[in-house]
Amino acid sequence: MRTPLLLTAALALAAAARAETYVLDTAHTVVSFKATHVIGKVPGRFTKFTGSFVYDPKHPKLWSAEAQIDPSSIDTDNAKRDAHLKSPDFFDVAKCPAMTFKSTKVTDVHGNHAKLHGDLTMHCVTKPVVLDLEIEGVAKDPWGNVEASFTATGKVNRKDWGIDWNKTLDSGGLLIGDEIAIELDVTGNPKPAQH
């Protein structure tokens, strides 16, 4: 009975050895969101972030991702609004200077689509989230550099993270919607080998 167990362990180690770790290419990665404002949508993004992901096309169970985002880098193309978003009414960046995501598992893998489960820490609160993954794959650019890309999208309720500032409109509605749409367009390069 020991031989099958050893064989299974050896196969698992071999699979792990093929899984590549990629470091985020910040020049080709976008961390963006959209929020309802009155009745329209306002887009925004975070411009400072780091992270990495593990990808092996043949072994989805090995996939993982993590990221660290600087909430003070929020950019909605309006300096006054950005200053308000950094204040205690929203992200409170002085008290909560870090935003992080760490995956916990991948499920529902069908072709190049899957569900990425993880913990999102924002506004000093950690909550589970599920993102829809679309895997673009791995390729080389014209200069021979290897890169892997994927898109992750999802929706969160900002109130779950204690971000609940709002104002009532004359019409009776609210100035800002609670549901925030997230879109991550991610590209990574293989992590350099450690010597």
Image: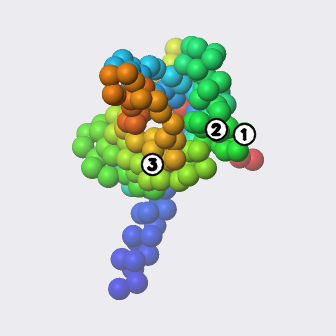
Under mark 1, the amino acid is: Ala
* Pick the front one: 142 or 180: 180
Q: Residues within 10 Å of mark 1 (few under 14, many from 20)?
A: few
Residue marked by disc 1? 94
Disc 2, SS = loop
Disc 3, SS = helix
Coordinates of residue 2 in the picture (x, y in percent): 40, 84
Query: N-terminal of the two: label 1 or label 3?
Result: 1
Coordinates of residue 195 in the picture (x, y in percent): 75, 47
Under mark 3, the amino acid is: Asp
Disc 1, SS = loop
Question: Is 136 displayed left or right of 84 in the figure?
Answer: left
Residue 8 seen in this snapshot: yes
* Pick the front one: 131 or 57: 131
Which mark is in front, 2 or 1? Answer: 2
Residue marked by disc 3? 160
